């Protein structure tokens, strides 16, 4: 169990909080590039700040404060111009630095500026950095830049704290129970065959590496030379789980909207068949998790939805002063220690772990350890591979 003070340090993400200051040292995806094709002006909320994301007519992307400096109207109603975003009320126009560049009717354009944050597009996503300057490099993790993959994005807003999602990522044993036993139990109740074979966990280990934590497991029926024990699944600090093998890699990115809401971004790659024409787009789906009765949509045979059920069922913010971690939770304890250690690093004025500033390390990509074949529990009772992100796909 944690003290009330430590629980709050972990859970709070707003400006000036220890965790909020740590998270502001990293780039976070706030939208897909395709979102701005549909609507070039979008309100976003990140780390408890309300902001406006826009693309102007020149193609420049900006992320600026929500309200106009003149009379406070929301810039969500702004009109993209060649030189920025024009306020709907009186026409004041803001460029991507938040600078007012036009004040219609006024004899001179006053040197006014509102809050603005750097944004970058990479791999079909738009990333924002809310921390101090100079900004670090946007990490070129392999899945964002590999040229042998076609990609797609699914975005879901969840009514829970981001850390509940991340704690799940360093908890291997839940797979055996939530996805195996409970998933099969529910499938049986609705008259369907079992979803997965489940194997009992024999060993779990966690290794800290340059970019976060490697989670490794050994289950019954596997030898110690299997990929899931020798290679494992990386957790990219602070908020990305990397899963899938070289054919179907994916990132699950848990972006803190505020203390009680998370933007869950599933960024998925599929190995392109030899000779196939590469896709030029990265399609995006924005999904709703809940049915009208509050139930998770289609969760019974979908592994990510089962995880979402567990996170949301813990409440908006789990009370960690009443939580009892045990030996199988040592990955959670290690991850929390890294968070506390790196909060202190930021308070000392230093860069936390996994911040990238070396161009040589970032180009052409940061290669992430990845399995050659998926985890054994992704195979059905018939021995066929079942894609954990796209349950209907077999290979």
Image (cartoon, grey):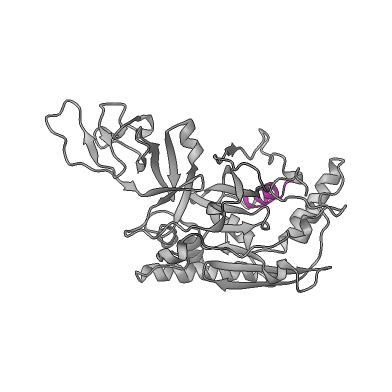
Number of marks in picture: 0
Can you see residue 1? no
Q: In the rendered view of the protein, which quadrant contains the N terminus? A: bottom right
Magenta segment includes 243: no
Q: Residue, x 69% and y 64% (percent of image)? A: 172
Can you see residue 291? yes
Residue 113 located left or right of residue 138: left
Q: Which residues are magenta?
A: 302-312
Residue 196 located left or right of residue 216: right
> Residue 22 or 5: which is nearer the viewer?
22
* Residue 314 image position (x, y, % from top left): 63, 53
Decide: is 154 above or below 383.
above
* Residue 5 image position (x, y, % from top left): 47, 65
> Residue 271 or 103: which is nearer the viewer?
271
Q: Residue furthest left?
A: 107
> Residue 211 or 330: which is nearer the viewer?
211
The picture quadrant where one finds residue 162 is: bottom right
Q: Main secondary structure of the magenta part?
A: helix
Q: Residue, x 29% and y 39% (percent of image)? A: 95
> Residue 67 or 222: which is nearer the viewer?
222
* Residue 384 image position (x, y, % from top left): 83, 52
Q: Residue, x 46% and y 56% (percent of image)? A: 12
Decide: is 86 above or below 371.
above
Residue 291 located left or right of residue 31: right
* Residue 294 image position (x, y, % from top left): 66, 38
């Amino acid at each position: 169990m944690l003290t009330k003070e430590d629980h709050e340090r972990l859970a709070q993400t707003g400006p000036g909080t220890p965790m909020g200051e740590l998270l502001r040292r990293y780039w976070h995806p706030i939208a897909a590039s395709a979102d701005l094709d549909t609507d070039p002006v979008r309100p976003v909320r990140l780390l408890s700040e309300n902001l406006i994301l826009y693309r102007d007519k020149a193609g420049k992307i900006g992320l600026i404060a929500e309200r106009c400096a003149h009379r406070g109207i929301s810039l969500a109603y702004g009109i993209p111009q060649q030189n920025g975003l024009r306020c709907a009320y009186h026409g004041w126009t803001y460029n991507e630095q938040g600078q007012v560049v036009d004040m219609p009717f006024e004899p001179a354009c006053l040197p006014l500026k509102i809050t603005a944050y750097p944004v970058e597009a990479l791999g079909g996503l738009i990333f924002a950095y809310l921390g101090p300057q100079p900004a670090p490099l946007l990490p070129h993790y392999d899945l964002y830049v590999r040229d042998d993959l076609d990609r797609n994005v699914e975005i879901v807003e969840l009514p829970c704290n981001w850390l509940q999602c991340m704690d799940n990522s360093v908890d291997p044993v839940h797979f055996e129970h939530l996805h195996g036993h409970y998933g099969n139990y529910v499938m049986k109740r609705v008259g369907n065959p079992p979803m997965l074979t489940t194997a009992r966990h024999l060993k779990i280990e966690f290794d800290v590496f340059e970019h976060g934590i490697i989670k490794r497991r050994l289950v019954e029926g596997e030898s110690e030379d299997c990929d899931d024990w020798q290679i494992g699944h990386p957790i990219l600090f602070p908020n990305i789980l990397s899963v899938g093998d070289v054919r179907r890699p994916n990132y699950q990115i848990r972006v803190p909207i505020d203390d009680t809401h998370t933007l869950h971004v599933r960024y998925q790659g599929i190995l392109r068949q030899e000779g196939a024409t590469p896709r030029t787009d990265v399609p995006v789906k924005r999904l709703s998790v809940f049915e009208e009765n509050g139930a998770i949509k289609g969760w019974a045979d979908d592994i990510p939805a089962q995880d979402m059920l567990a996170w949301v069922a813990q409440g908006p913010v789990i009370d960690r002063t009443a939580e009892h971690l045990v030996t199988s939770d040592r990955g959670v304890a290690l991850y929390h220690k890294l968070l506390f250690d790196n909060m202190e690093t930021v308070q000392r004025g230093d860069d936390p772990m996994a911040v990238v500033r070396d161009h040589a390390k970032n180009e052409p990509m940061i290669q992430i350890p990845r399995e050659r074949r998926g985890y054994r529990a992704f195979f059905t009772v018939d021995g066929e591979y079942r894609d954990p992100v796209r349950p209907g796909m077999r290979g």
